[in-house]
Image (spheres, coloured by chain):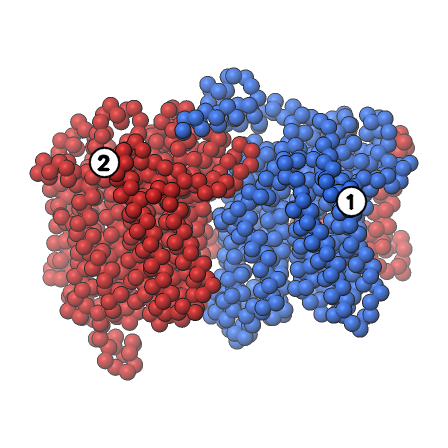
Chain colours: A red, B blue
C-alpha cells in the first residue's frame, strides 16, 4: 500500500484537470460533488496507508516513493519523491479529512455562485498542493507545495475579484509570503552547500550525527523559520492573514485556519533535528516569536466586530501557541494543537460562514444577536467550538493547549505567563463573540430594510450540505483530545500520549533522547513537571475566568466593555506598514524609475545629441540619422583597427 | 582539452545546420517575388518556410545525441582561405534549445500576429531575422558569428521603424546605434583575437574551437580582448547601465518584433558570454567576475523596481526582462554546473514566458488600442479565459514552482550561492519584487469592475488560443519535467565549466571555497579538490540512508 502514496495527490490532481476541462459542463452541484469525492478518495488512501503503517514495526515506518528525477544537474539530484512516515500520514489524514468536509460544506455555501465550478477547481488544486507539501521527501517538493498553496490562496482570496479590497488582499498575501520564501530558498541553498542534498533524511541524519556544524544548522533552522513566519502568519509578517478573510468563508476555514497556515509548524517539526543542532538562540527565538504573536493577536481579537476578523486574529494567536511549542521542544504538542485547532477552528469558521449565510452576507456582529433559536444547529456546534478553543475540559483544545503550556513552563515561567494570559484573553474574546452572535439582544430587525427590500428579513438555518460538516467537526472537537492525553495518574496508561508514541521516531531523535526515554522526557525533573496537575487546574481556572468575565461584560452588562480604538486598529501595525509602503516606499521606487529616465537614459541621449550636433555641423543638409551615426562609428572602428595594426604591430 | 566534435550519423547526408539558415533566407528572397496585392499568399509562403525550418529544428532535437558534450551536426568548409575564415557551424547543449526555440517561435509569430500593412516586406524581414538569429547561435567561426550578429540588426531596425508605434523612428535608431556601437568593439576584438592567436597556433584562423583550445593569451591581452566582446554582449543582454535602448525598442516595436526581441534576440548577448566570453577567455572571465556579478544583481533589483513604477504595460514587461536577464548573467559568472545549466535553461524559459507575455500584451493592444495600465481594468470579468492564460504566463515569469521559470531561476540561484554567496542573497530578494510588480499590474489590468471601454473586451479567440497553447504547454512541461532538457544541456555546460577550471586558478580563489569544505572539517582537511570532496560526501550520505 505504501507505494501507492502517489494516489493521495493524484486524486485531487485528476479532479483539478477534470474541472479545468469540463467544470462548466458538470455545473452545480456535480462539480462540487465530484471535487469532494476526489478529496474523499485521497482520505481513504491516506487511511489505508495509515493502517498499513500501524501494522508495521516502528523502525520500518518510513518509505520513500520516487516518481521521477525532477531537477538533476551534477551533484544536485532532486527527485519528485514522497516520504511516507507517521508524521506525513498524520498530516495527510487531517488535511484530506477536514478538506473533504469543507468541500462538502462549500457545495451549500457556494450555491448559486456563477463561478461555482471554478471554486472547486481551485480547492482541488489547493488540496493537491497541500498534499505535495506534507508528502515531499525533500525540501524542494515541499517548496513546490508551499508555493502551490500560496498561489491557490491568492486565487481564492481574490475569488470575487471585481471588488478591489479582495484583489488587494490576495496580492498582499502573495507578496508577504514571498518575503518568507526568501528565507526558505536561502535555507535550501545552504543545505545543498552543506550536505549536497535537499532530502530530509540526509539533512536530518547529518544533524543527528553531528556532521552538520552548529553554524550551518543555525543558518538552515533560522532561515526556514523565516519561511514559516511568512506562511504561518507570525510577527512581523502576520498582516496578510486578517485581510485574507476577504475570500469565501470555506476558504478561510480550509486554507487560512486548518491547513495552509500550519505548514510552517509542520516544516519546523519535520526538520526538528536541525533545530536541535542549531545554536540555542534559534529555538528560543521561535518560542518568543510564538508567545508574543499569541498574546499580540489575542489583544487585537478583543475589539474586532467582524465575525471573521475575530477568528482570523484568533488563528494568528493559536498559531503562535504552536510555535511556542516548537521553540520549547514540544514538537508533539505542536502537531497535537495543529490537529485540534484544525478541528475547532474549521468548525468555528464554517459556523461563522453559516451565520453569514443565514444573515444574508452580514459579517458585523453588532448587527447580529439572539440567533440561537433561529439557527439551533449552527449555534450548538459553534458553542462546542467555543468551549474547545477556550480550553474547557474535556473538549479538544484544552488538552493540546495544556501540553504546550506545560512545556513552556518547563522552559521559562515568563513564556508560561504569556501563554496563560493569552488563554484568558482567548476565553474572553470567544465568549464575547458567542454572546454577540447568538445571545444578547437581536440587532438584526433594524437592518431588515438594508437587506431584503421585499421585507420579511429573518435569519435562517443553513442547508444540510453545510450543517452536516458542522456536526462532524463538533464531534471531533469534543473527542479530539483523545489523540494525546497527558500522563496523569487518573488516565489509564494505555490511553496516554498516543500521538507521541505514533510520532516517536520522528520527533525524539538521537542518542540523548534515547537516554532520557520517550514521552515528556525533556521536562522530567523540572518544577513544571512536578506541578503538572496544579497547572492543569490553573489552566481550567483561567479559561473559566475569561468566560465568566466575558459573560458579565457582554451578557449581564455588569462591567463596561473595554474595546479601545487602538486594539480595533490592530495597534496600528498594519496601517504603519501600509503607510510606509504607500508613501516613502513608493516615492523611493518612483525616484529610481525617474532617475532611469533622466540620468541613465539622459546620458545616452546626451552623447547622441553631441554626436548629432557635431555631425550635423560637419555635413549640413544631410538627412538620415542612421547613416550619420554609422559613419561616425565606422570611422571609429577604422581608427581602432588602425591602432591595433599600426601601433601594436599585429599584422 | 581536445575539441570533441561529434559527427552525427545523419549529418553527412544532409547539411542540416546550413539548411536551418538557408531555408528562411531563401524564403525571404522568395517573398520579394510575390505580388504586393496578395498578402495572404505572402503569409502562406512565409509560414511554409518558417514551418519547414521549425520542423528541421525539431528533427535536430530528436536526433541530438544527449550523451555527447561536443558540437554535433558539424558543418565545416573553408570560406576565405587567406584570412582563415570558415563556414563552421555546430550545435551543442548550450545552443540546442535556443535554436529550437527560435525555429518554433517564428512560425507562431508569423501566423499569430497581424502587421496590418505592407505584409510582404514585413514577412521578408522577419524571415531574414530568423536566418540571422539561427546563424548566430550556430556559428563556430568568429567572423561568421559577427556577420550574423550584425545581420540581425538590419531587419529588426526596419521592423521597429516600419511597423512600430508612435515613437518608432526614435526607438529604432536608438536600438540600431546602441547595439552597433557595441558591435564595433567586438569587431576590433575579434580581429585582434585572431591575429594574436596566430602566434600560438602558427596559422591565421577565425575558428572558435581552434582558438579557444589552442591559444594561450597573456592575462592582460586576454582581458582587453574579452572586454571588447563583453561590451557588445552587455549591450545586447542588456546589462545595467547599458539597458535604456531596450524599453524604448520593446515599447515601440510591433508585437512580433517584441516577441522575437525578448524571445531570442536578447539571448544573443547571454549566449555570447558563454560561447565567446567564457570559452575564449576563461582567465579574463574569472578575473572580471565581480564586476559582472555586481552588475547582474543591480540589474535584477533595479529592473524590478523600475518595472514596478511603469505606467505602460509593454514597458513594464521590458523592464522585467532586464531583471530576468540579470539572473542569467549571475548564473553565467558563477561558474558552477548548476548555475550555468540554469542560465542556459532560463534563456529558453525567458524566451517562452516573456515571448508569450508580449504576445498577450499585443492582443490587449489590438483590442483596446492602448498599453496604458490605467486605461485597462476588470478584464478578468469579461474575458476569463484570456485572463487565465495571462495568469499562467505571469506565474511562470514570477517563478512559481511547477512552471518553467522557477526551474531555471532556482538552478541559477542554488548554483551561484555556492560560489558567489552574497550576490545570490541579494538576487534572491529580487524574487520578492518580481511578485510585486507583476501581481500589481495584473490587479490593475484584470481585477476590479470593468468600465465602459473595457466591458466589451473580446474573449480569447480560437486562433489566438492555438498560438498561445504551445507556450502554455512548454511552460508547464518544463516546470514539471525539465529532465529531458537538463540532460542535454548539462554535458556541454560541464565541459565549459571544466574548460574554465582548467585554464584558471579558479580553485585558489577564496570565493570558491564552498561551505562544504568549511563546514565539514573532517572532509575539508583531506586536501583534495572541491569536486572530489562533494562526490565522497554524497556517497557517504547515500550509504547512511540505505
Of B169 and A123, nearer the camera is: A123
Q: The disc numbered 1 marks a residue on which chain?
A: B
Give neighbour class at mark 2: few <14, some 14-19, many 20+ (Cα, 10 Å). Answer: some
- Where residue A621 sits, quadrant-wise, is bottom right
Residue B215: quadrant of the picture: top right
Q: Nearer the viewer, residue A599 or B335?
A: B335
Which residue is rendered at x = 43% and y = 65% of the image? A23
Relative to A188, residue B133 above or below: below
Q: Distance between the residues labelled 1 and 2?
A: 70 Å
Residue B406 pos. (x, y %): 52, 46
Q: Quadrant of residue A26?
A: bottom left
Q: Image point 75% across, 29% down: which residue?
A: B213
Q: Mark 2 lies on which chain?
A: A
Identify residue for label 2: A501
Residue at horizontal 17 percent and vertical 41 percent from the top:
A485
Q: Is residue B454 left or right of residue A56?
A: right
B393 lies left or right of B68? left
Q: Which mark is residue B13?
A: 1
* Quarter of the image with the N terminus of chain B in it: top right
Residue nearest the observer in this picture, B425 or A466:
A466
Amino acid at each position: 500500500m505504501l507505494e501507492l502514496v502517489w494516489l493521495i495527490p493524484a486524486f485531487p490532481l485528476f479532479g483539478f484537470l477534470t474541472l479545468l476541462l469540463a467544470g462548466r459542463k458538470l455545473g452545480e452541484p456535480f462539480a462540487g460533488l465530484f471535487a469532494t469525492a476526489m478529496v474523499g478518495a485521497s482520505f481513504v488512501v491516506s487511511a489505508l496507508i495509515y493502517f498499513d503503517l500501524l501494522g508495521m514495526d516502528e523502525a520500518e515506518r518510513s518509505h520513500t516513493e520516487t516518481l521521477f528525477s525532477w531537477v538533476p544537474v551534477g551533484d544536485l539530484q532532486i527527485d519528485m519523491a514522497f516520504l511516507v512516515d507517521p508524521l506525513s500520514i498524520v498530516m495527510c489524514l487531517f488535511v484530506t479529512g477536514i478538506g473533504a468536509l469543507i468541500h462538502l460544506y462549500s457545495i451549500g455555501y457556494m450555491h448559486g455562485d456563477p463561478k461555482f465550478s471554478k471554486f472547486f477547481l481551485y480547492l482541488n488544486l489547493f488540496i493537491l498542493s497541500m498534499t505535495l507539501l506534507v508528502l515531499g521527501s525533500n525540501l524542494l517538493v515541499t517548496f513546490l507545495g508551499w508555493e502551490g498553496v500560496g498561489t491557490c490562496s491568492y486565487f481564492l482570496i481574490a475569488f470575487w475579484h471585481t471588488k478591489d479590497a479582495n484583489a488587494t488582499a490576495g496580492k498582499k498575501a502573495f507578496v508577504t509570503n514571498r518575503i518568507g520564501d526568501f528565507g526558505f530558498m536561502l535555507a535550501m541553498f545552504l543545505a545543498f552547500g552543506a550536505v549536497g542534498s535537499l532530502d530530509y533524511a540526509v539533512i536530518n541524519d547529518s544533524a543527528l550525527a553531528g556532521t552538520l556544524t552548529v553554524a550551518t544548522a543555525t543558518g538552515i533552522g533560522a532561515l526556514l523559520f523565516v519561511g514559516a513566519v511568512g506562511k504561518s502568519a507570525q510577527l512581523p509578517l502576520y498582516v496578510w492573514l486578517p485581510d485574507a478573510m476577504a475570500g469565501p468563508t470555506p476558504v478561510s476555514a480550509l486554507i487560512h485556519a486548518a491547513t495552509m497556515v500550519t505548514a510552517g509548524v509542520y516544516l519546523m517539526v519535520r526538520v526538528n533535528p536541525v533545530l536541535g543542532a542549531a545554536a540555542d538562540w534559534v529555538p528560543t527565538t521561535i518560542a518568543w516569536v510564538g508567545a508574543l504573536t499569541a498574546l499580540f493577536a489575542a489583544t487585537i481579537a478583543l475589539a474586532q466586530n467582524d465575525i471573521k476578523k475575530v477568528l482570523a486574529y484568533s488563528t494568528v494567536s493559536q498559531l503562535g501557541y504552536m510555535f511556542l511549542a516548537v521553540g520549547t521542544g514540544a514538537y508533539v504538542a505542536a502537531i497535537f494543537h495543529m490537529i485540534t485547532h484544525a478541528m475547532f477552528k474549521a468548525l468555528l469558521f464554517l459556523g461563522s460562514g453559516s451565520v453569514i449565510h443565514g444573515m444574508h452576507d452580514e459579517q458585523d456582529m453588532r448587527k447580529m444577536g439572539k440567533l440561537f433559536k433561529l439557527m439551533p444547529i449552527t449555534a450548538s456546534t459553534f458553542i462546542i467550538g467555543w468551549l474547545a478553543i477556550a480550553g474547557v475540559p474535556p473538549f479538544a483544545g484544552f488538552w493540546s493547549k495544556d501540553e504546550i503550556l506545560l512545556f513552556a513552563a518547563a522552559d521559562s515561567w515568563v513564556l508560561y505567563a504569556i501563554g496563560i494570559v493569552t488563554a484568558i484573553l482567548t476565553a474572553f474574546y470567544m465568549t464575547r463573540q458567542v454572546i454577540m452572535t447568538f445571545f444578547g439582544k437581536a440587532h438584526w430587525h433594524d437592518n431588515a430594510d438594508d437587506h431584503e427590500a421585499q421585507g420579511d428579513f429573518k435569519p435562517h438555518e443553513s442547508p444540510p450540505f453545510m450543517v452536516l460538516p458542522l456536526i462532524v467537526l463538533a464531534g471531533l472537537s469534543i473527542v479530539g483530545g483523545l489523540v494525546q492525553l497527558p500522563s496523569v495518574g487518573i488516565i489509564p496508561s494505555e490511553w496516554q500520549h498516543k500521538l507521541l508514541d505514533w510520532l516517536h521516531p520522528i520527533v525524539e531523535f538521537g542518542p540523548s533522547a534515547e537516554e532520557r526515554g520517550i514521552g515528556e522526557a525533556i521536562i522530567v525533573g523540572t518544577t513544571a513537571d512536578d506541578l503538572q496537575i496544579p497547572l492543569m487546574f490553573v489552566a481550567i481556572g483561567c479559561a473559566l475566568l475569561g468566560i465568566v468575565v466575558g459573560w458579565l461584560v457582554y451578557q449581564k452588562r455588569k462591567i463596561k466593555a473595554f474595546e479601545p480604538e487602538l486594539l480595533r486598529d490592530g495597534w496600528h501595525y498594519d496601517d504603519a506598514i501600509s503607510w510606509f509602503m504607500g508613501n516613502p516606499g513608493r516615492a523611493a521606487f518612483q525616484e529610481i524609475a525617474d532617475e532611469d529616465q533622466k540620468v541613465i537614459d539622459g546620458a545616452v541621449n546626451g552623447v547622441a545629441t553631441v554626436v548629432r550636433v557635431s555631425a550635423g555641423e560637419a555635413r549640413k543638409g544631410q538627412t538620415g540619422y542612421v547613416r550619420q551615426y554609422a559613419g561616425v562609428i565606422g570611422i571609429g572602428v577604422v581608427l581602432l583597427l588602425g591602432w591595433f595594426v599600426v601601433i601594436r604591430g599585429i599584422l | 582539452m581536445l575539441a570533441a566534435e561529434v559527427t552525427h550519423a545523419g549529418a553527412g547526408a544532409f547539411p542540416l545546420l546550413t539548411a536551418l539558415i538557408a531555408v528562411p533566407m531563401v524564403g525571404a528572397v522568395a517573398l520579394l517575388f510575390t505580388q504586393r496585392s496578395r498578402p495572404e499568399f505572402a503569409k502562406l509562403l512565409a509560414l511554409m518556410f518558417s514551418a519547414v525550418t521549425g520542423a528541421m529544428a525539431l528533427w535536430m532535437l530528436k536526433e541530438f545525441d544527449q550523451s555527447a558534450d561536443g558540437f554535433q551536426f558539424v558543418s565545416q568548409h573553408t570560406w576565405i582561405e587567406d584570412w582563415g575564415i570558415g563556414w563552421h557551424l555546430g550545435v551543442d547543449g548550450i545552443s540546442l534549445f535556443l535554436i529550437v526555440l527560435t525555429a518554433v517561435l517564428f512560425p507562431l509569430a508569423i501566423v499569430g500576429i497581424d502587421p496590418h500593412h505592407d505584409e510582404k516586406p514585413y514577412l521578408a524581414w522577419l524571415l531574414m531575422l530568423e536566418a540571422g538569429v539561427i546563424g548566430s547561435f550556430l556559428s563556430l567561426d568568429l567572423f561568421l558569428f559577427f556577420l550574423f550578429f550584425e545581420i540581425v540588426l538590419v531587419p529588426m531596425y526596419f521592423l521597429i521603424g516600419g511597423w512600430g508605434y508612435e515613437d518608432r523612428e526614435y526607438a529604432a535608431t536608438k536600438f540600431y546605434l546602441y547595439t552597433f556601437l557595441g558591435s564595433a568593439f567586438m569587431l576590433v576584438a575579434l580581429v585582434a583575437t585572431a591575429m594574436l592567436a596566430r602566434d600560438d597556433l602558427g596559422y591565421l584562423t577565425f575558428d572558435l574551437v581552434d582558438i579557444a583550445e589552442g591559444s594561450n593569451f597573456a592575462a592582460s591581452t586576454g582581458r582587453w580582448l574579452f572586454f571588447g566582446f563583453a561590451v557588445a554582449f552587455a549591450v545586447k543582454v542588456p546589462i545595467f547601465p547599458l539597458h535604456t535602448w531596450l524599453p524604448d525598442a520593446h515599447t515601440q516595436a510591433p508585437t512580433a518584433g517584441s516577441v522575437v526581441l525578448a524571445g531570442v534576440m536578447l539571448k544573443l548577448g547571454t549566449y555570447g558570454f558563454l560561447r565567446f566570453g567564457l570559452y575564449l577567455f576563461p582567465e579574463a572571465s574569472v578575473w572580471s567576475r565581480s564586476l559582472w556579478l555586481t552588475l547582474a544583481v543591480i540589474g535584477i533589483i533595479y529592473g524590478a523596481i523600475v518595472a514596478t513604477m511603469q505606467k505602460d504595460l509593454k514597458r513594464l514587461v521590458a523592464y522585467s526582462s532586464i531583471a530576468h536577464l540579470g539572473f542569467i548573467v549571475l548564473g553565467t559568472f558563477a561558474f558552477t554546473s548548476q548555475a550555468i545549466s540554469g542560465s542556459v535553461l532560463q534563456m529558453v524559459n525567458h524566451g517562452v514566458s516573456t515571448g508569450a507575455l508580449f504576445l498577450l500584451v499585443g492582443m490587449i493592444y489590438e483590442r483596446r488600442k492602448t498599453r496604458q495600465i490605467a486605461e485597462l481594468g476588470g478584464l478578468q470579468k469579461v474575458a476569463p479565459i484570456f485572463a487565465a492564460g495571462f495568469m499562467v504566463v505571469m506565474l511562470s515569469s514570477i517563478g512559481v514552482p511547477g512552471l518553467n521559470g522557477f526551474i531555471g531561476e532556482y538552478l541559477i540561484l542554488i548554483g551561484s550561492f555556492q560560489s558567489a554567496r552574497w550576490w545570490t542573497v541579494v538576487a534572491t530578494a529580487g524574487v520578492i519584487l518580481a511578485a510585486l510588480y507583476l501581481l500589481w499590474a495584473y490587479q490593475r489590468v484584470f481585477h476590479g469592475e470593468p468600465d465602459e471601454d473595457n466591458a466589451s473586451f473580446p474573449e480569447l479567440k480560437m486562433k489566438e488560443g492555438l498560438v498561445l497553447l504551445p507556450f502554455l504547454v512548454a511552460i508547464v512541461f518544463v516546470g514539471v519535467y525539465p529532465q529531458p532538457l537538463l540532460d542535454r544541456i548539462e554535458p556541454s555546460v560541464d565541459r565549459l565549466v571544466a574548460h574554465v577550471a582548467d585554464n584558471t586558478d579558479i580553485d585558489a580563489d577564496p570565493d570558491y571555497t564552498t561551505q562544504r569544505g568549511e563546514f565539514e572539517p573532517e572532509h575539508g582537511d583531506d586536501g583534495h579538490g572541491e569536486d572530489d570532496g562533494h562526490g565522497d560526501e554524497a556517497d557517504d550520505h547515500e550509504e547512511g540512508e540505505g
